[in-house]
Amino acid sequence: MNIIIFLIGVIITLVYLMSFVWEMKQEKMRKEMELLDDKYYYTRNHSNEREKQPKRKKGSQSRMKNYNWKK
């Protein structure tokens, strides 16, 4: 009886490990296909584009520099 319970535990563990490895392989293949597929590249990777503020003067910086750093 103890051997049967042990074998059932081993079978359940092996099924779990095999499904885990299979899922990792599927995830890896999905990532590779996503990197190779450039159909929706800009919508996928650059969705957080923002509008830049216009410069006040030609050649000026868009953000003021703070040279007065104090420790």
Image (cartoon, rainbow, N blue to C red):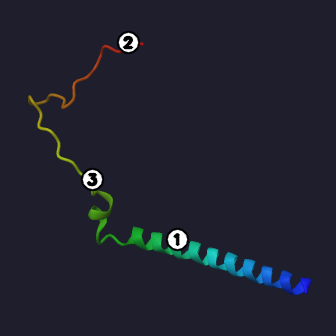
Left or right: residue 10 compared with residue 40: right
Where is residue 57 shown, x and y percent of the image? 8, 28
As measured in the structure, the alpha-carbon distance from the residue carrying label 2 to the one carrying label 3 is 34 Å
Q: Nearer the viewer, residue 38 or 17?
A: 17
Q: Amino acid at mark 3?
A: Asn
Q: Residue at x 68, y 77 (%)?
A: 16
Which quarter of the figure has residue 63?
A: top left
Q: Position of residue 69 (x, y in %)?
A: 35, 15
Q: Which mark is residue 48?
A: 3
Q: Earlier in the sequence, mark 2 or mark 3?
A: 3
Image point (79%, 84%), residue name: 8
Q: Quarter of the image containing the C terminus?
A: top left
The numbered mark at residue 38 is none
- Quick check: marks 1 and 3 in contact, CB under 8 Å? no
Q: CA distance from mark 1 to mark 2?
A: 49 Å
Farthest left residue in view: 57
Question: Which residue is the site of mark 2?
Answer: 70
Question: At which x and y percent is residue 23?
Answer: 57, 75
Residue 24 versus residue 1 in the image, above or below: above
Q: Which residue is mark 1?
A: 28
Viewer-nearest of labels 1 and 3?
Answer: 3
State which mark lies toward you, 1 or 2.
Answer: 2
What secondary structure is found at the residue carrying circle 1?
helix
Density class for disc 3 (Cα within 10 Å; few <14, some 14-19, many ≥20) is: few
Q: Residue furthest front?
A: 1
Residue type at mark 2: give it: Lys
Which quarter of the figure has residue 21? bottom right
Residue type at mark 1 is Lys
Q: Is residue 62 left or right of residue 44?
A: left
Could you tell me how far apart the alpha carbons at marks 1 and 3 are, in whole angstroms? 26 Å
Q: Secondary structure at mark 2?
A: loop
In the structure shown, which secondary structural element does the residue marked by tag 3 occupy? loop
